[in-house]
Image (tube, grey):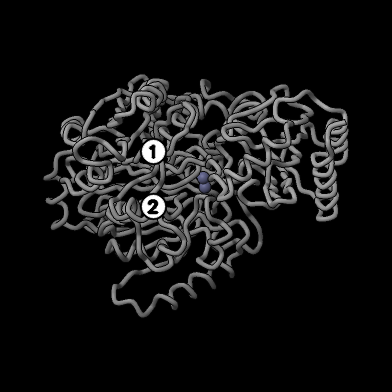
Amino acid sequence: MESQTQPALRVQFWGTRGSLAKPGRSNVRYGGNTSCVQVTSAAGTLLVLDCGTGIHDLGRALTVNGKKPVRGHILIGHTHWDHIQGLPFFTPLFVPGNEWDIYAPRGLGQSLRETLAGQMQYTYFPISLEQMGAKIRYHELVEGTFNIEDIKVTTRYLNHPALTLGYRMESGGATVVYACDHEPFSKPAEVASCEFNLRDRRHVAFLTEADLVVHDSQYTAAEYPQKVGWGHSTMEYAMDVCRAAGAKRLAFTHHDPLRDDDAIDQLVTAVRAEKADELLPLEVFGAADGMVVDIAANAAKQSEISAGSLSAVITDSAGVVEHSVLLAVANPAFAKSLAEAAHSHRLRVLEAKDGESALRVARAEHPSLVIVEEGLPGTDGLAVCRALRGADPADGNDVPVVILAGVEDRAAGQAAGVTDWLTPPFSPTYARTHMQAWIMRTSCRWQRAARPVDEAQRLATLRGLNLLDTAPQERFERITRVAMALADVPIAYISFVDENRQWFMSCQGLSSKETPREVAFCAHVVVLRQRLIIPDTLQDPRFAENPLVTEGPRIRFYAGFPLILPDGSCIGTLCFVDTRPRQFSEASLRAFEDLADMAKQEILTKNG
Ligand SMILES: [Zn+2]
Ligand SMILES: [Zn+2]
């Protein structure tokens, strides 16, 4: 193997299928194994990216042909099943004398070791993680740069429902980027016109001048509008970001399980032809199980890479990554509530009372998150954001900046580079859930409903009914009991959406009489003014991290029907809720609607 022409990096694909292993006669050429890619440096440093089912064949190859004992590094992008399912079948982990380091993004929840051990519990698998014979070390990563032998590795958060890192590997002047399970940060219309927002431009920078980019491209641009929020890219977007980055080659991967060999061939040919008129050369191909790509050394680039100073950001499981949040908030009640949310994540809190000191603290302390109130004394919130964005990259010009304001100004915010808005009122739970997402640079999959335009009239009508906070009445109880039986659901209720809460006129299967409005699914129906059916809340970016989904009563299915009174006010809903995903026929949904009409008639009937 030691020859003059040895590549600086050799990339071998072992699994290129997304989501689900898909063997079969029509998938012979691209293969059916889920994500696994081997990267080997000229000096023999062995990296394994993800451990989907493809890692099984890699394990056999290492056992049969490799040097003994085996020394390697497994870099996991995220711990969704299709990226870790092969791990218990990777035989080199069971051989005493072998040494492995396993790396994955550090979450705010359980440790990497606990997560991996979870899929090997007795219920799922006969052998536990502890029974693996090799010496295994676990490392949890944040964004940054570190060295593995002769390979420089840079990590970057991707956009996926689970906390996910992409890996950029550089050695001998050759660069390979693995960006799997990533969705555009920009809105679909912006993606279509290549007008990338700040976070997508950061993604482009991550791919800069790579010799090979292995990129998620599960969907096509035509399919994407139906797949927004699922955490995957389109072939067209992958090409556009690679071209903007000046990358040389692009391997499409995470092939949709619905595509066979011919379908992948056709899509690659079509997308290649569609983008062929572009000036910048970019070689694109569909990655296939078993494919090998060699990248030659490049002496000119090599010196440039080794000159920079490396910030090691890697920690083992016992270490603590210290994140801090800068709160430039004048309102004492909001400052207190945000500080509580920060403390619940063990975040260090930095405070500033005016715009100038906010900028000074941000530059000196490099916080992981900045929350700034709009009407701060001195410089206002948007000006602080603009100043931070204009700073040197070394001073953290890409720190997430959240503006606390009574009203969102999306256009001004986008121009200033604002990451997100926080509008009062918000609960500590809401602040805590979103704070985690901002710091981890992922999207928070819990949205509050907006206030409807006729809010004042609506509230007046609701209160005029004199039903809020009254005792249960048999005529409403009867309706929710029938609802429960008709849909065969454990929970059914009539909800009135009040100013800051939803209150249950009648409720079967829940012990509480009300919940905060920000968690209420029904608050969305009041804005939509039409039925809202959510077959599976975990698949819906508006509700997947809503506390009513992640904690009790763990709503998985929701069907809400609006109660619109003759004056046009939508005061609340009749709801059907289940703790498992459900599908109903149109005929059933119409029967539910009839029941909602009956509830409305009862509301309009005077008491007694
Ligand atoms: Zn995946
Ligand atoms: Zn995933």
Between residue 4 and residue 73, name the one nearer to us.
73
Q: Position of residue 373 (x, y in %)?
A: 31, 36
Between residue 285 and residue 133, name the one nearer to us.
285
User: Does mark 1 have its CB less than 8 Å from ligand 2?
Assistant: no
Question: Relative to 430, does residue 62 appear above or below in the rendering?
Answer: below
Tag count: 2
> Disc 1 marks which amino acid?
Trp
Q: Quadrant of the C terminus?
A: top right
Instruction: Give the image quarter of residue 557.
Output: top right
Task: Residue at 58%, 28% (x, y): give it.
Answer: 120
Query: Furthest-bottom residue in view?
Result: 277
On the picture, is 123 further left or further right than 43?
right
Task: Residue at 64%, 64% (x, y): give it.
Answer: 26
Question: Relative to 98, does residue 273 appear above or below in the rendering?
Answer: below
Q: Position of residue 315 (x, y in %)?
A: 31, 27
The label number, if any, that marks residue 438 in the structure image: 1
Residue 64 can be seen, yes or no: no
Between residue 197 and residue 474, name the one nearer to us.
474
Task: Residue at 43%, 47% (x, y): give it.
Answer: 159
| Nearer mark to the viewer, of 1 and 2 | 2
Question: SS at mark 2?
Answer: helix
> Disc 2 marks which amino acid?
Arg
Question: SS at mark 1?
Answer: helix
Residue 240 can be seen, yes or no: yes
Q: Position of residue 90 (x, y in %)?
A: 51, 36
Instruction: Give the image quarter of residue 135.
Output: top left
On the picture, is 303 further left or further right than 524?
left
Instruction: Give the image quarter of residue 292.
Output: bottom left
* Residue density around tag 2, few if under 14, some if 14–19, many if 20 or more, within 10 Å: few
The label number, if any, that marks residue 410 in the structure image: 2
Comes first in the chain, label 1 or label 2: 2
User: Does mark 2 have its CB less than 8 Å from ligand 2?
Assistant: no
